[in-house]
Image (cartoon, rainbow, N blue to C red):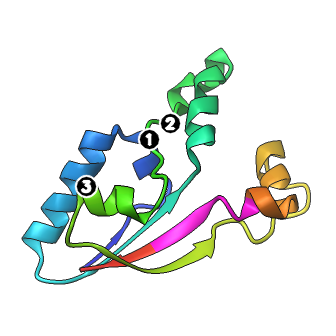
Amino acid sequence: MLLVAEGLLMYLPEPEVGRLLRRVTARFEHGTVLFDVVPPWVVRSSRFLPPGYRGFRMAWAPRGPGDVRRLAPHLRLTGAVEALRWSPPGGARPAQRLFAAVPPLRRQLRLLRWEF
């Protein structure tokens, strides 16, 4: 089983993230789960989005693998890569360009691979 939840879990409240991950690991004998994470400060900052973007307010950001394992104990982290390695010239939003251009910011947006 392969679950790809890129661009999804950060918008769900933590209890819903936990329910989803536990249901997947309980339903299937083994599999891979891929999802991206943002740092907690990005979630906090999303509260201040302008009115037209408030639907994009984020709700969940694990501080580390232990936060995910607490929600779904059967998962084990097997890989992580930077989510933004580059940004297309002129085609990305300003925030994407900023994150892609500043290595300390870029390293905080990660795509994680979990196995069970």
> Label 3: which residue?
71
- Which residue does the numbered mark 1 point to in the structure image? 11
Image position, residue 90 (x, y; %) = 90, 55
User: Amino acid under label 2?
Assistant: Met
Residue 22: percent from left, percent from top: 17, 60
Q: Is label 3 in a helix, a strand or a loop?
A: helix
Residue 112 vs residue 6, the one in the foreground:
112
Q: Is residue 54 magenta?
A: no
x and y, in percent, of residue 112 in the image: 48, 71
Q: Position of residue 89 (x, y in %)?
A: 91, 62
| Disc number for residue 58 | 2
Q: Would you place residue 36 above or below residue 27 in this image?
A: above
What is the distance, in whole Å, between disc 2 and disc 3 at their CAs? 18 Å
Q: Which label's residue is closer to the chain start, 2 or 3?
A: 2
The amino acid type, in three-letter code, at marker 3 is Leu
- Residue at left 60%, top 76%? 81
Q: Amino acid at mark 1?
A: Tyr
Give the magenta-colored segment's residue range: 106-112
Q: Is residue 88 above or below residue 56?
A: below
At x 19%, y 50%, the residue is 19
Q: Are marks 1 and 2 in contact (CB under 8 Å)?
A: yes
Q: Locate the C terminus and report the quarter of the image it occupies.
A: bottom left
